[in-house]
Image (tube, rainbow, N blue to C red):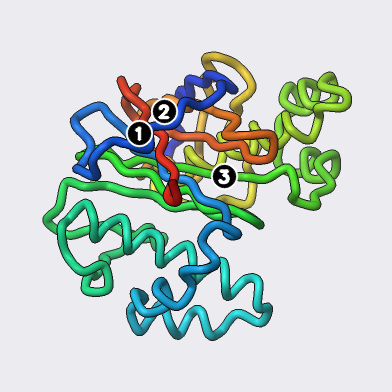
Amino acid sequence: MEGRTLTVHCSGPQDVTWNDAAPVEPPAEGMVHLWFATLEQLRPRTAFYRDLLDPVETERAQRFRFKQDRERFILGHGVLRELLGRYLKRDGSLIRFSRGAFGKPYLDRKRLCFNFSDTKDAILVGFTTGVEIGVDIETMARDVDHAAVSEHYFTAPEIAVIQAAGPHAKRRFLQFWTRKESVLKASGVGIMDDLRVLRVDGEHNVMTIEHEAFVKMAAEEYHVRTWHLNEQHIVSLASPTDATVINFRPVCS
């Protein structure tokens, strides 16, 4: 398959204004709802979220070797089902997913689209109507050798920007990482070995992509926004259209 051009528009990082009083109704056209919670906030509801999982998710949770990974899976997928249940006005445990070629879940015969991300200590879930999005969250508490990882996954210009950030290099690394992940998740591909095919350090990034699945599944362009939720958490949102309203909501208000 021949390569083609992809354009990625990037903005941010920005600070967040929270909206914890809005009703839980499907987002209007052009709007994105982003829901956030820390695992510490969700932990008291573990039993409730475990009961929301379907048999496949329950089996997956049981396969995790480490308790913290199993807990994060249960809380994250439980929150997703709880929120979907509130949007769809039905029992979240009864919701069934279909999956794309690379495992991205979606709802049959529904215009409500969603994407999920977790990190070491937090959960992020995004919702739109009629537009596939990708969201990614990272934490500054993550133990990562950003210099070594950058050499493997980032372009030379991106590495230069990270190095120039000095004491803020790790934060800059995570901003770029979440941008790349959000684009791949929006496309439905999910992950590729060589993230250097994506450049996300500039306001407008034009590149040639050749990965067969990515060429087939990616939109012509993506609009990527990055935010600092707080001192610890960095998130990015990718959408093939530039959302007019971004609505941040705490799961636990």
| 187 and 118: which is toward the camera | 118
Amino acid at dot 3 = Ile
Q: Judge from the rendering whether residue 22 lies leftward or rightward of residue 78; answer left or right.
A: left
| 72 and 148: which is toward the camera | 72
Amino acid at dot 2 = Tyr
At label 3, counting other C-alpha atoms closer than 10 Å, the crowd grade (few under 14, some 14-19, many 20 or more) is many
Q: Secondary structure at mark 2?
A: strand
| Relative height, residue 118 to residue 111 (above, below) | below
Residue annotated with mark 3 = 137
Q: Position of residue 18 (x, y in %)?
A: 44, 31
At label 2, counting other C-alpha atoms closer than 10 Å, the crowd grade (few under 14, some 14-19, many 20 or more) is many
Structural distance between the alpha carbons of marks 3 and 2: 18 Å
Mark 3 and mark 1 residues within 8 Å of each other at the beta carbon? no
| 15 and 244: which is toward the camera | 15
Mark 2 and mark 1 residues within 8 Å of each other at the beta carbon? yes
Residue annotated with mark 2 = 222
From where the camera sits, is residue 84 visible? Answer: yes
Q: Secondary structure at mark 3?
A: strand
Structural distance between the alpha carbons of marks 3 and 1: 22 Å
Amino acid at dot 1 = Ala
Q: Judge from the rendering whether residue 11 lies leftward or rightward of residue 94; answer left or right.
A: right
- At x 72% / y 29%, what residue is drawn? 172
Residue annotated with mark 1 = 219
